[in-house]
Image (tube, grey):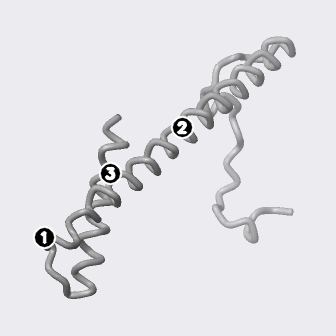
């Protein structure tokens, strides 16, 4: 929920910035209704973005579990550690300088 509130505050800040660019007063009786509207739109966007993030995390977690299960069936280490296999050092970082 803090993300949604942050996006709502961002929406209100956009309204403040818009009025500043137009050189209009920030808290005028005729334009005060814009802040809640912009905050609501920003909050709705933040709520939608939070849902997108949660769905992407669920897909990534399902894919990770599928890959780990595939490794287990193949008899490989189910660890996700990096550097398990020793790679001999060729002495150069550049691909052009590597021996052919």
Asked which secondary structure carries label 3, the reply is helix
Q: Counting residues from the N terminus, which is met first, the one under dot 3 or under dot 2?
A: 3
Q: Residues within 10 Å of mark 2 (few under 14, many from 20)?
A: few
- Residue drawn 64% across and 61% down? 93
**Between marks 3 and 1 in the image, the one whose residue lies nearer the viewer:** 1
The C terminus - image quarter: bottom right
Left or right of 69? Residue 54 is left
Please tell me how many numbered marks the rendered image carries.
3
Asked which secondary structure carries label 1, the reply is loop
- What distance separates the C-alpha of mark 2 from that of mark 1? 33 Å
**Which of the 4 image quarters holds residue 9?**
bottom left
**Between marks 3 and 2 in the image, the one whose residue lies nearer the viewer:** 3
Kindly identify which numbered label has been placed on residue 27: 1
Kindly identify which numbered label has been placed on residue 8: 3
Rendered location of residue 54, percent (x, y): 55, 33
Asked which secondary structure carries label 2, the reply is helix
Rendered location of residue 85, percent (x, y): 70, 31
Please name whichever residue, 64 or 34, is drawn nearer the observer in this view of the structure.
Answer: 34
- Residue drawn 36% across and 51% down? 40
Vertical comparison of 97 with 68: above or below: below
Instruction: Identify the residue position indicated by label 2 in the image.
Output: 51
Rendered location of residue 42, percent (x, y): 39, 55
Left or right of 57? Residue 20 is left
**Which of the 4 image quarters holds residue 96?**
bottom right
């Amino acid at each position: 929920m803090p993300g949604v509130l942050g996006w709502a505050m961002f929406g209100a800040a956009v309204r403040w910035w818009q009025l500043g660019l137009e050189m209009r007063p920030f808290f005028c009786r005729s334009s005060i209704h814009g802040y809640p509207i912009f905050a609501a739109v920003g909050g709705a966007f933040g709520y939608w973005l939070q849902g997108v993030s949660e769905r992407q995390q669920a897909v990534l977690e399902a894919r990770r579990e599928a890959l780990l299960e595939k490794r287990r069936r193949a008899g490989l280490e189910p660890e996700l550690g990096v550097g398990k296999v020793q790679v001999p050092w060729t002495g150069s970082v550049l691909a052009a300088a590597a021996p052919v």
